[in-house]
Image (tube, rainbow, N blue to C red):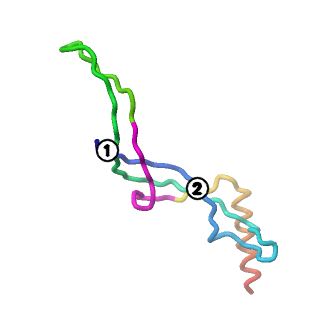
Amino acid sequence: MICSADFSSISSYDDFENSVWDSEEKEYIFLERCDVREFHHAEFECILRFSVSGAGENMSFELQEVSYELQLDQYTRTDREFLESEDPRLDALADMMDILEEYHRH
């Protein structure tokens, strides 16, 4: 059977592109972690295994197994929203790193 479904997920990832790299220490001074809510629409194959028992008005169906493979990626994503950090210490640290980076550019 071909199924169609809409999903939303909240994921976290390390934002290497916007983090500060220390070339002398060979490590990130500040590695920003971001949370994002993604919305996906996917079509996928699904196998349903069920049994039928009884007859007529006493007939019943029992679902025994549902199996599918689902891949969510940039092709299934329909929308994305970046979530604000709920930890004020991380926000302050990010601001401090931005100021230091700007200071060292001049």
Query: Viewer-proximal residue, 76 or 97?
Result: 76
In this rendering, position of residue 44 left or right of residue 88:
left
- The magenta segment is 67-81
Of the numbered discs in the image, which one, if any, rests on residue 73? none
Mark 2 neighbour class, 10 Å CA radius: few under 14, some 14 to 19, many 20 or more? some
Of the numbered discs in the image, which one, if any, rests on residue 35? 2
**Three-letter amino acid code at disc 1?**
Cys
Secondary structure at numbered mark 1:
strand
Counting from the top left corner in percent of width and height, residue 90 is at: 71, 59
Cα distance, mark 1 to mark 2?
28 Å
Counting from the top left corner in percent of width and height, residue 14 is at: 63, 61
Q: Residue placed at 74% from the left, 63% from the top?
A: 93
In this rendering, position of residue 71 left or right of residue 54:
right
Counting from the top left corner in percent of width and height, residue 24 is at: 81, 76
Q: Quadrant of the N terminus?
A: top left
Q: Residue placed at 28% from the left, 17% from the top?
A: 53
Query: Viewer-proximal residue, 36 or 25?
Result: 25
Q: Quadrant of the C terminus?
A: bottom right
**Three-letter amino acid code at disc 2?**
Asp
In the rendered image, which quarter is residue 61 located in?
Answer: top left
Of the numbered discs in the image, which one, if any, rests on residue 3? 1
Mark 1 neighbour class, 10 Å CA radius: few under 14, some 14 to 19, many 20 or more? few
In the rendered image, which quarter is residue 3 located in?
Answer: top left
Q: Residue placed at 77% from the left, 74% from the top?
A: 22
Q: Residue furthest bottom?
A: 106
Q: Vertically, is 12 above or below 96?
A: above
